[in-house]
Amino acid sequence: MVTLHPAVSELSSMLRERLGLLQGVLLIPGTASTTEKPILLQNIADAEAFVSGAEVAVIGFFQDPESAEASQFRLAAGRIPEVPFGLSTSPPVLSHYGVSANTVTLFRRVDNDRRDLDMNNEDVDSEKMIRFVRINELRLVTEYDPVTAIGVMQSSLQFNLLLITDKMSPKHPERMRKFRAAAELFKGKILFILLDSNLKSNEKVVSYFQLKKSQLPALAIFHTPDDEQDVMTVDEISVKHVQDFCNHFIQRMQKKEDESQEKHLSEEL
C-alpha cells in the first residue's frame, strides 16, 4: 500500500473539493447536483441579472412556490442542466415582466425575444415544459433538428444562415469557432443555424438548397418573408467569408425592397 505524503494528500483533498464546487456551479450534465435549481429570484434586479447572464434563461413565475405547477417546474429544471432556471413569487417581479402567476417564460439573447407558457388555461406537466424549452431555446448558433425547427420558424428574425457541414469532420471544431465568431457580428439580425449533413432527417433541407454531399460544407442564407435564398460552397469557413456573404445578401434584399416601394409609389401617383 502506497502512503501519500501529508502535503500531497491535503492537496488532493482540496482539488476534489474544488472540483465538486465547480460541478455544482457549472451544472455539468450528468454530474451536477440539481438542488440549486431553480434559483430563487427575489427582486427585479436579481431577475434582470439572471436573464442577461445567459444566452437562454427560463423563469417560472408562481404565487405559491410549493404548488403542483412549481413542483413540475422543478422537475423540468432538473432534466435540462445546461439551461439556467429561476423561480420568482415576487409580485413586483411578475408585474415587471407583465405575467400572471403560473407562467413559465423563456428569454433568449439571439433575437432579444421571449416566449411565455401559460399554465392557467391548460394542463402542463414537466414533459410539456421541457418540450417548450427545447423548441424555443434558440442560441447564437442553433443546431437544427425536428424540435428546434419549430422555434426557428417562429423566430422574429427574417434572415437565417445555415452552415451545412459534417459534424464528424476533424475540421468541425474550427469551423464552428469561426462560424460562432461571425454570428456575434450579426446578433439580432440573422439567426445562425448549424445543420449536420450526416443526419437523415436533414437530407430534405440539403436537397432544398440543391446541394449534394460532395459540395459541402456550404453556407445557405434564407429570407423568410419571400423565400429568397443564396448558397455558397466553401472549402473552409472564415469570419470574413461569412460576413461578406451575409452583407451582400442583406444589401440585395434591401435593394429589392427599395425598388418595390418605389414602384408602389409610382403606381399610386
Image: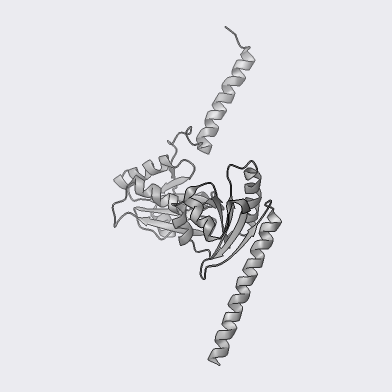
Q: Is residue 244 visible?
A: yes
- Which residue is painted at 35% across and 46% down in the image? 127
Give the quadrant of residue 65.
Answer: top left
- Does residue 249 lie above or below 79 as drawn? below
Q: Position of residue 27 (x, y in %)?
A: 50, 37
Q: Nearer the viewer, residue 81 or 252?
A: 252
Q: Position of residue 172 (x, y in %)?
A: 62, 44
Residue lying furthest bottom in this view? Answer: 269
- Asked whether, in this view, residue 79 is left or right of residue 227, the answer is left
- Which residue is painted at 45% across and 46% down in the image? 85
Q: Nearer the viewer, residue 8 or 82?
A: 82
Q: Position of residue 236 (x, y in %)?
A: 68, 51
Residue lying furthest right in this view? Answer: 240
Q: Nearer the viewer, residue 216 or 223?
A: 216
- Which residue is painted at 53% across and 57% down in the image? 207
- Does residue 177 lie above or below 121 as drawn? above
Q: Position of residue 84 (x, y in %)?
A: 48, 45
**Is the C terminus in the top left, top right, bottom left or bottom right quadrant?**
bottom right
**Number of callouts:** 0
**Is the N terminus in the top left, top right, bottom left or bottom right quadrant?**
top right
Q: Nearer the viewer, residue 87 or 110?
A: 110
- Asked whether, in this view, residue 182 is left or right of residue 65, the answer is right
Q: Is residue 45 visible?
A: no
